[in-house]
Image (cartoon, helix red, strand yellow):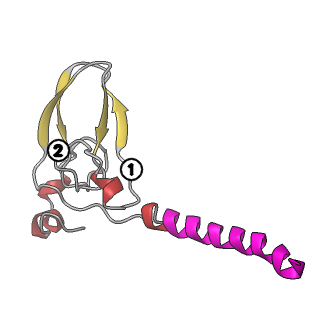
Amino acid sequence: MGGAGALLRPAAWKLNQRRDISSWLARWFPRTPAKPVVALKTPIKVELVAGKTYRWCVCGRSKKQPFCDGSHFFQRTGLSPLKFKAQETRVVVLCTCKATQKPPYCDGTHRSERVQKAEVGAPL
């Protein structure tokens, strides 16, 4: 009764299922990450508490700068926050232009002409 058609259905279903999973993964986890955007053009001073773990926003889209609020995930950027643990309690200056060479700490890059000419919310 089923014949050869019955044998093809499970394989075709598995192929379609793989395509569906692949397209879902591609939407939520792009292979090429988005570029970080300039959140602010000045750094933020924060007090870090010894032993506490923080998640610094890499994408620049968080509403809780300089820390991550999960915007990278919901906006499908393909970027992830930088997780770090404070070694001692102290006040530090964290980058919000997202162009620092010493993440998560500010290295003064925000003073560059490139960052100052960029629009807030736009990639560099």
Marking on residue 50: none
Magenta residues span: 1-25
Q: Is residue 10 magenta?
A: yes
Given residues 14 and 122, the one toward you in this image is: 14
In space, the residues marked 2 and 1 are separated at their CA atoms by 15 Å
Relative to 52, residue 104 above or below: below
Q: Residues within 10 Å of mark 1 (few under 14, many from 20)?
A: some
- Tell me, yes or no, whether the two marked residues, 2 and 1, touch with CB atoms within 8 Å: no
Using the rendered image of the protein, determine whether residue 31 is visible from the camera's viewpoint: no
Quadrant position of residue 59: bottom left
Q: Read off the residue under disc 2.
A: 64
Q: Where 73 sits versus 81, above or below?
A: below
Q: Which amino acid lies under the numbered mark 1 shown in the image of this protein? A: Ser
Residue 83 pos. (x, y %): 37, 37
- The C terminus, quarter of image: bottom left
Tell me the residue at 35%/46% (across/down).
81
| Viewport quadrant of the N terminus | bottom right
At horizontal 29% and vertical 60% (from top left) the residue drawn is 36
- Magenta region, mostly helix, strand or loop? helix
> How far across and down, in percent of the image, does residue 119 sit?
12, 68
Label disc, if present, on residue 80 of the rendered structure = 1
Residue 29 in percent (x, y) is at 46, 61
Asked whether 14 or 36 is in front, the reply is 14
Determine the residue positioned at 26% across, 44% down: 68
Residue 39 drawn above or below residue 85: below
